[in-house]
Image (cartoon, grey):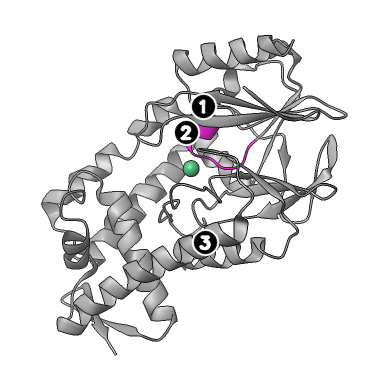
């Protein structure tokens, strides 16, 4: 537990993921809020309760939960706080925490369809059966309040909501307009670059979001918001925003350059690129490594450096 100031405490719980611990933030104001709710494991719950107790609170004292995005390590413990009056977040969190079967089917169909188009061989498509495994660590519940860009946080009117899609299509961050404190979820992390994870078009839309382009736009947007300190979902609290954003951009651009140089040798399908860029990881983490590869292709296409054709029902990318 770390005291940020008299209004905010950082509480840290373990996760079963490679990323390690995840932070939640206790926010005092007109109401007592928890920003994010850890991961749904007994270890995380015990750690969270112990840290609340250290600062004189019990789980029952929490009046509302505010979510930065829908990933399991941020929503996990919501149903343990059964007394909360409000659960607040972006509308795109809803299908995940409500276990919307129709949405999950839409999600899986999209992955199957898009991976086929990207040249993923049939035998690798079994990974789709694993997409639901992380749900066991995810919270169940229902949003009472939908918020978006420009709104003020209920009960904490000094915090403005900043839309920060990219890592997730439900991602929001919260900026204290008085002192520049920024609760950034997984949008801005000092030590790792967040994965821009591919998600299907929203129901009723036909275009898939381009998460890497959104991510670049939204980290750049953060440079002009008067942010002074970043309270992240993982890793250290930091203030050197310009340096971190420059580093993230440079790292991404160097990955794109690698993709471009492969395409200059000869044209590739997204899957062929993925195998070459992530030779050790692609079989185990096909969704993440393909998301990253497709993200770089979206970026290069947006810059006018590559073009794609469809050959035998599969995308082939060419350097221009
Ligand atoms: Zn996340």
Q: Nearer the viewer, residue 192 or 133?
A: 192
Give the residue at mark 3. 215
**Which residue of the protein is positioned furthest toward the bottom in this rendering?**
320
Going from N to C along the chain, the mark reached first, 3 or 1, is 1
Q: Nearer the viewer, residue 171 or 9?
A: 9
Dots 2 and 1: beta carbons under 8 Å?
yes
What range is drawn magenta here?
67-75
The residue sitting at 45% across, 43% down in the picture is: 102
Q: Is residue 71 magenta?
A: yes
Picture quarter with the N terminus: top right
Label 1 SS: loop
Picture quarter with the C terminus: bottom left
| Residue 253 placement (x, y as % from top left) | 40, 71
The residue sitting at 34% across, 71% down in the picture is: 256
Q: Residues within 10 Å of mark 3 (few under 14, many from 20)?
A: many
Q: Where on the picture, by quarter, is residue 86?
A: top right
Give the residue at mark 2. 72
Horizontally, residue 107 falls left or right of residue 11, namely: left
Q: Nearer the viewer, residue 232 or 134?
A: 232
Query: On screen, 168 above or below 50?
Result: below
Q: How far is the residue under mark 2 from the one under mark 3?
A: 20 Å
Tell me if I can see residue 204 in this picture.
Answer: no
Label ID, residue 18: none
Give the residue at mark 1. 76
Label 3 SS: helix
Dots 3 and 1: beta carbons under 8 Å?
no
Q: Nearer the viewer, mark 3 or mark 1?
A: 3
| Residue 32 placement (x, y as % from top left) | 78, 24
């Amino acid at each position: 537990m770390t005291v940020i100031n008299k209004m905010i405490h950082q509480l840290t719980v373990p996760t079963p993921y490679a990323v390690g611990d995840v932070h939640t933030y206790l926010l005092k104001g007109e109401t007592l809020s928890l920003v994010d709710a850890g991961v749904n494991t007994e270890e995380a719950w015990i750690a969270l309760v112990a840290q609340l107790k250290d600062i004189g609170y019990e789980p029952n004292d929490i009046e509302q939960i505010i979510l930065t995005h829908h990933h399991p390590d941020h929503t996990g413990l919501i149903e343990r706080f059964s007394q909360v009056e409000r659960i607040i977040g972006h509308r795109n969190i809803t299908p995940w925490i409500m276990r919307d079967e129709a949405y999950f089917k839409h999600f899986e169909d999209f992955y199957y369809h898009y991976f086929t188009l990207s040249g993923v061989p049939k035998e690798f498509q079994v990974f789709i059966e694993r997409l639901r495994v992380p749900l066991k660590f995810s919270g169940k519940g229902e949003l009472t309040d939908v918020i978006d860009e420009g709104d003020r946080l209920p009960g904490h009117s000094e915090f403005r909501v900043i839309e920060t899609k990219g890592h997730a299509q439900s991602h929001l961050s919260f900026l204290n307009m008085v002192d520049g404190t920024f609760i950034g979820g997984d949008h801005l992390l000092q030590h790792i670059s967040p994965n821009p994870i591919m998600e299907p078009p929203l129901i009723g839309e036909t275009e898939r979001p381009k998460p890497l382009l959104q991510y670049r736009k939204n980290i750049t947007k953060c440079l002009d918001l008067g942010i002074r300190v970043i309270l992240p979902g993982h890793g250290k609290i930091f203030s050197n925003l310009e340096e971190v954003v420059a580093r993230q951009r440079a790292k991404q651009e160097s990955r794109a350059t690698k993709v471009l140089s492969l395409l200059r040798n000869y044209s590739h399908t997204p899957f062929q690129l993925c195998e070459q860029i992530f030779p050790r990881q692609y079989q185990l983490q096909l969704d993440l490594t393909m998301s990253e590869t497709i993200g770089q292709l979206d970026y290069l296409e947006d810059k006018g450096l590559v073009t794609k054709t469809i050959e035998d029902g599969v995308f082939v990318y060419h350097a221009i």
